[in-house]
Image (cartoon, rainbow, N blue to C red):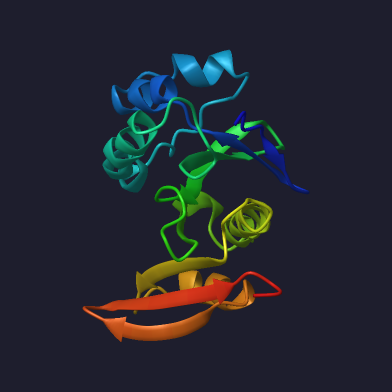
Amino acid sequence: MMVTRIATGRLILIPFTRRLASSLLDGNSEELLKLALNVHDAWPDTETLETLPKIIKNLEAVPEPTGFESWIIVKREGMIGIGDAGFKGLPNAAGEVDIGYSIIAPEWRKGYGYEAARALLDWAFTQPGVRAVTAECLTDNRGSARILEKLGMSQLGREDGMIHWRVGKPGY
């Protein structure tokens, strides 16, 4: 399946490739420049750099990006990468995919996290076999919890400092 970009009002989500993720992990922004993206001083941030090995591992499990891996969050104004969002792999046997997202600190509280997560949630619910989207956030991460609430997710419970969330596909 060929995955294309997802556009929102202020953002473009671009699927990571193995080459792009590996390049960023090596501190090389050449692949970003090939995509006509500008480099932000704050991205990739520490959180993204810690996540890149997992992104690469997920991408190595598929012949090409499926959309159920990670995406770069690009702010249309300036075509600058400001974060990443995505899923932790293909839907499980119950039809669930787990979503995560991260925005660089200079872009917090501007609605970009919600906008990116909303776009991915909507995309996921158009994919065959997806019946629900799950997420988790730290109990003290009020910003992330607010985003998940705005997405219509319900808290499933709390465990080990994390809140677990879920929203079902409309009609299921």
Quadrant containing the N terminus is top right
Quarter that holds the C terminus: bottom right
Please state which of residues 84 and 43 is positioned toward the viewer in this rendering: 84
**Which residue is more in the foreground, 55 or 89?**
89
x 48%, y 32%: residue? 16
Residue 105 in picture, x, y percent from top left: 46, 53
Q: Position of residue 29 (x, y in %)?
A: 43, 20
Residue 96: x %, y % from top left: 47, 63
Q: Quadrant of residue 137?
A: bottom left
Residue drawn where x is 29% and y is 22% of the image: 26
Query: With respect to residue 139, does 25 lie above or below?
Result: above
Q: How many labels were placed on the picture?
A: 0
Residue at x-position 50% and y-position 62%:
95
Q: Position of residue 152 (x, y in %)?
A: 62, 77
Query: Horizontal placement of 20 versus 4: left or right?
Result: left
Q: Please, is residue 84 above or below residue 111 in the view?
A: above
Residue reaching furthest to the right: 9
Residue 133 appears in the rendering: yes
Q: Residue at x 37, y 18 (%)?
A: 28
Side (left or right) of 118 relative to 26: right
- Could you tell me if residue 142 is visible in this image? no
